[in-house]
Image (tube, helix red, strand yellow):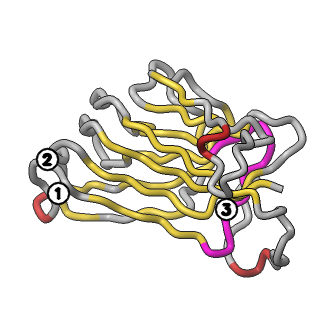
Amino acid sequence: MVGVTQGPELGIEPGELGGAAYSVRGFTAATDTSYPNALATLWNPSSDKRICVVEVWLFLAGALPQTTRNNPRLVLATARGTAGSTITPDGDNDLGGEGAAPPSGALLDLAAYSAEPTLASPPLWGVTFGGSSVTGSGGHGWTWAAPGGVWVPPGQGLCLLADDGAAAAWPTSEVVFEWLEG
């Protein structure tokens, strides 16, 4: 895992991050049939601050692709790519209620990308479902919780990737990233 550490081996001390917690959500556009497809990336543009992602949610607002498998994955992005839209979190995204914008300047990039982010290998986490077992008109959701956090270094991001194993369009989806900053 290039540049990312995860799990309880981190040795995070209480208060180490100063208790600054943030959450941002947005809706992706449906993706094209390129493979793989980035759905969203929480990008850390800071030159000196790392962020600690503690939870990622994905909710499908449309039908899943009819492929042999549907594999949403989390993977480190080492170059940003060109997103279809970007959300800039501000004081409203401060879960502590203090109204402070994230010191890192974190950004939420959303599909559809005209140029995909550069992804590290291998993926950190993912789920695999047979296409026939979770197809439908929407309403499916996944949550990745990382009690020890996934550290995203300065100038990198954590990408939510639709890895279908083949070229397939992915439906409009709602994504949520929650993270901590020191």
Q: CA distance from mark 3 to mark 2?
A: 31 Å
User: Given contact means CB atoms under 8 Å apart, are the residues at marks 2 and 1 in contact?
Assistant: yes
Q: Which three-letter amino acid code belongs to the residue tagged 2?
A: Gln
Q: Using residue 148 as the reference point, say whether residue 129 is left or right of it.
A: left
Of the two numbered discs 3 and 2 in the rendering, the one whose residue sits closer to the viewer = 3
Q: Nearer the viewer, residue 21 or 156?
A: 21
The magenta stretch spans which residues? 147-157
58 or 75, which is in the foreground?
Answer: 58
| Circle 3 residues within 10 Å: few <14, some 14–19, many ≥20 | many
For marks 3 and 2, the one nearer the N-term is 2
Quadrant housing residue 26: top left
Of the two numbered discs 2 and 1 on the same chain, state the one appearing first in sequence.
2
Q: Earlier in the sequence, mark 3 or mark 1?
A: 1
Task: Indicate whether 144 appears above or below 10.
Answer: above
Give the image location of residue 116, x and y in percent. 50, 28
Left or right of 69 on screen, residue 76: right
Residue corresponding to mark 1: 131
Horizontally, residue 166 falls left or right of residue 73, namely left
| Dominant SS in magenta | strand
Q: Who is closer to the viewer here, 36 or 83?
A: 83
The stretch drawn in magenta includes residue 74: no
Which residue in the protein does label 2 denote?
66
**Which kind of residue does numbered mark 3 sit on?**
Val
